[in-house]
Image (cartoon, rainbow, N blue to C red):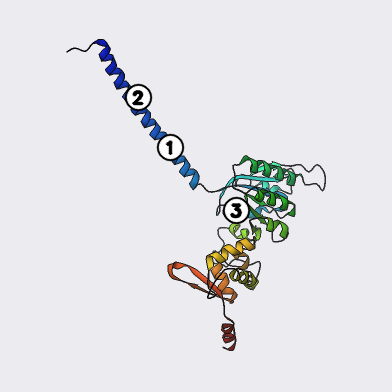
Amino acid sequence: MVPTPWEGSDVVHSNAFFSESAELRQYASAATWIEGAVMNAEQQRLPRFAVLIDADNTSPQIAAGLFEEVAKFGEASVRRIYGDFSGAQLKSWADILQKYAIDPYQQFAYTKGKNASDIALVIDAMDLLHSGRFDGFCLVSSDSDFTRLASRLREQGADVYGFGAQKTPESFRQACRRFIYTENLLLAAAPSGASTTSKPNSLQPPSAAIPILEKAISQIESEDGWVMLGPVGQHISNLFSDFDVRSYGHSKLSDLARKTGAFDVEKIEGGHMRIRAKPANDGAKAKTK
């Protein structure tokens, strides 16, 4: 039986309908996969940080160590430096801006004694904060004028890492989630031909870390005096934003604790480390030997 023209037309339209439906499902599946891949990539991406440098109060010698340090906890998505680059005072900074992809923000010193660079840095920090694109900020300065800025950024939920010299006032250091002394970054900027076996210079003797370790250990619950070293390190970071084992001439907390001679440190099952203050009788025995 020969189909009528309109019956054949229905078959064609039906086939076309199923063909289009299959294509739509294929496109929808591909779009879902792409969206999932983008979300996974976004979740795996390092936290974004805006690095804002006060050129007047920071040495260019720390540049290499600065960005190596930032890379340990996030991505330096924005790199800006503020100062008056028209004079010879900041020429050393101007010479390395391109090498480290730092964007210079020129601020002329219209009036002597007034720091326009600080104001520009603060304004930009707030603009970047309200853009919602950043997880945190790195404020590079030894100037206590940025104390309130650090506090304000943290009030909004942003992480703030401060970088400055050891002379930086305590108010600014404590306003940051963590504060890194720039003296500890100079090692990263050492010439490639320098010896890698030499021990790092220390800003303080290991004995200066004893009360810090004792306080952290005492605030962690324990039945026998032993506590895990990892939580101790985390608790120290919460108590002292500027604590850095490199300041005491070591790269590991376990090595620093052993060097003080005031703590027992041992490795347990699973490769974890634990620590306790040495019992008083151990110290007495050591003195009689």
Does 272 appear above or below 41? below
Q: Which mark is residue 34?
A: 1
Image depth: mark 2 or mark 3 in front: 2
Q: Which mark is residue 259?
A: none
- For mark 2, does the 10 Å Cα neighbourhood hold few (<14), some (14 to 19), or many (20 or more) residues? few
Asked whether 15 or 116 is in front, the reply is 15
Residue drawn at x 62%, y 68% as measured from the top left = 248
Q: Secondary structure at mark 2?
A: helix
User: CB atoms at circles 3 and 1 under 8 Å apart?
Assistant: no
| Label 2 sits on residue | 20
Real-space CA distance between mark 2 and mark 3, rounded to the nearest whole angstrom: 57 Å
- Left or right side of 119 for 210: left
- Residue 288 x %, y %: 58, 89
Q: Secondary structure at mark 1?
A: helix
Q: Earlier in the sequence, mark 3 or mark 1?
A: 1
Q: Quadrant of residue 256?
A: bottom right
As shown in the figure, which amino acid type bears the numbered disc 3? Ala
| Label 3 sits on residue | 64
Q: Residue furthest left?
A: 1
As shown in the figure, which amino acid type bears the numbered disc 1? Ile
Residue drawn at x 31%, y 25% as measured from the top left = 18
Real-space CA distance between mark 3 and mark 1, rounded to the nearest whole angstrom: 37 Å
- Residue 143 x %, y %: 73, 54
User: CB atoms at circles 2 and 3 under 8 Å apart?
Assistant: no
Q: Earlier in the sequence, mark 2 or mark 3?
A: 2
User: CB atoms at circles 1 and 2 under 8 Å apart?
Assistant: no
- Residue 98 x %, y %: 61, 44
As shown in the figure, which amino acid type bears the numbered disc 2? Glu
Image depth: mark 3 or mark 1 in front: 1
Q: Earlier in the sequence, mark 1 or mark 2?
A: 2
